[in-house]
Image: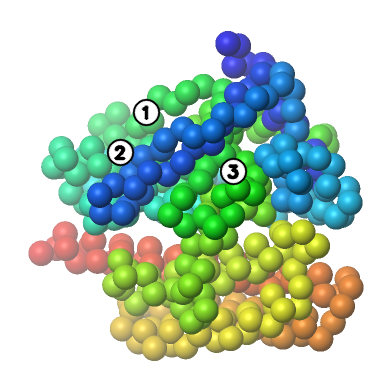
Amino acid sequence: MNTNAHKVVIAENGPYLVSGSVPLAVQVIAPNTEGLSWDWVQGRSFQAEASYALCRCGASATKPFCDGSHAKVGFDGTETASRETVARQAETYDGPTLTLRDAESLCAFARFCDAGGKIWSLIEKTDDPAARALVIREANHCPAGRLVVHDKNTHKAIEEPLPSGSADESRDPRRCQRAGNCAPAGTEVGPTMSRSTNSPTIVAPRAWQRLCGTCRPCAATHGRDEERTGIMQDTQVKDAVDQVRSATQQLHKAISDAAAKRGGAAKADLEAVPMKAKAAIDSIKSSVATQNAAAKKHLTEAVTFLEATRTHAAEGVKTSGKEFQTAVRQTIADARAAVQQVSEAVAAKRTAGATASAKK
């Protein structure tokens, strides 16, 4: 199979145009005996032609394939993600034999990083062969490209081989309530990606590129029960700042998912935002005093963005038409900025902890 011919073109406000006889299949997350994400298991394979179009708007009745619904619903495919390289976005965590690069904004909530006490703790124990092997495994199973490990001796990324040139839809049967309607979540290494406009071609990295703005890999349903309380109470997350991060991530994803659904966000979607933002703010304020100076700075910035999130959402409920859509975009942008600041606070806390441990 000639993988050089594999290609994905992002049509402006339209579908992903796939060519080169790229196979298409479902990849299902299989848990271990403890219920934690552990492996990918191939599920249904789709009969795909040499060229086909994959739904990007989320409204197709023939998912994962496009049926032209993007034109009917007025899908806006404007790119909002950062164009910075993964290396620039990533925080680096240093271990005895490995370094871990973590670009948290790419997180798909597949949670392969949780087993064994979480990858950020394991990286500090990589002089133990078992811990080293688990870190490498968890990073290689991450579907979003968030986690990459490098060998400290060779300085090269450790990447296990993947099937070349395939497109896959990822699902978590433990969490995804919309599995029957999911659009594709990513393409594996092999195809090149480009836009239909005159812009540079993007070569897809080893990690999968997300293909659907409406149904991210289960991110739409993670923490759904917890969202009703305003703060995601993950029993595996003990640290207060990690709790805040979970809360802000859920807030951002809730409004982002609402904006991506058919017909866009409704006023009811914005009405719930101020309460959730306030819950996150209160959580930050209750924990900020115990943090180091660097973490405090980022948490203070996060509060500023969360206040702006509350304001834009509250104002948006009172508007309509273009003003409402502008308020939705501003709400999403501020919520995303809040997530980034809290993530920086988490990184600052971990760095301080690692430094203190090294001095002992």
Residue 311 x %, y %: 69, 85
Q: Earlier in the sequence, mark 3 or mark 2?
A: 2
**Residue of label 2:** 136
Q: Is residue 357 left or right of residue 65?
A: left
Judging from the image, what secondary structure is the residue with disc 1 in? loop
Mark 1: few, some, or many residues within 10 Å (few <14, many ≥20)?
A: few
**Residue of label 1:** 160
What residue appears at the point 57 percent right and 50 percent down from the top-left corner?
Answer: 179
Instruction: In the rendered view, tell whether residue 87 sits above or below residue 53.
Output: below
Query: Marks 3/2: CA distance?
Result: 23 Å
Residue 103 x %, y %: 47, 51
Instruction: In the rendered view, tell whether residue 252 sits above or below residue 281.
Output: above
Judging from the image, what secondary structure is the residue with disc 2 in? helix
Q: What's the amino acid at mark 3?
A: Ala
Residue 285 x %, y %: 43, 87
Residue 210 position by quadrant: top right
What residue appears at the point 23 percent right and 37 percent down from the top-left corner?
Answer: 133
**Residue of label 3:** 185
Q: Earlier in the sequence, mark 2 or mark 1?
A: 2
Q: Decide which of 337, 220 is in the foreground and name it.
A: 220
**Residue placed furthest toward the left:** 360
Residue 289 position by quadrant: bottom left
Q: Is residue 315 left or right of residue 73?
A: left
Q: What's the amino acid at mark 1?
A: Glu
What residue appears at the point 69 percent right and 75 percent down from the top-left corner?
Answer: 269
Residue 165 x %, y %: 57, 23
Q: What's the amino acid at mark 2?
A: Ile
Image quarter where the C terminus lies is bottom left
Mark 2: few, some, or many residues within 10 Å (few <14, many ≥20)?
A: many
Q: Earlier in the sequence, mark 1 or mark 3?
A: 1
